[in-house]
Amino acid sequence: MKHKVTDEDFQYFISQCKKWIDRFSLQEWKIYFRHQKDDADVLAAYSLAYTDKNVTIFLNTHWLNPVEKEELDYCAFHEVAHILPAPLFAQCHILYREECDSQTHTLINKLWDVVNHPH
Ligand SMILES: [Zn+2]
């Protein structure tokens, strides 16, 4: 059964994304948000045009799991954090797509651990 992601969830997701955009100083990017149905089992996604400094962040309208705030927090962080290595990614992705995806996700998850366990 799929769980509906409400407009309230979407507004919360946007507020969390904006928090990270601010903290990572990504104001030079044009960032758009879409609450859009995606039949694939994805919670959120992004689409980025590096040369235009343009990003669209998507939140799926339905999730397989119940919608939890912690998950919205993580998704917001995750999609915004994808913008950080964009200059590097634009180059390496052409040659090493899978390795580049995998290393980017390792980096994002390390950053998430750091922000959640500040010492
Ligand atoms: Zn990702």
Image: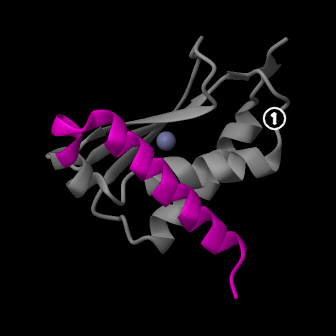
User: Which residue is more in the foreground, 74 or 16?
Assistant: 74
Residue beneath disc 1: 67
Residue at 43% in and 43% down: 102
User: Would you say the beta carbon of the disc 1 residue lies within 8 angstroms of ligand 1?
Assistant: no
Residue at 20% in and 46% down: 92
Q: Quadrant of the C terminus?
A: bottom right
Rendered view: 63 above or below 22: above
**Magenta residue span:** 92-119
Residue at 66% in and 23% down: 61
Question: Is residue 31 left or right of 42 when viewed as pictured?
Answer: left
Disc 1 is placed on an element classified as loop
Residue 103 appears in the figure:
yes
Rendered view: 38 above or below 30: above
Q: Main secondary structure of the magenta part?
A: helix
Confirm whether the magenta stretch covers residue 37.
Answer: no
Residue 94 percent location from the top left of the image: 17, 36
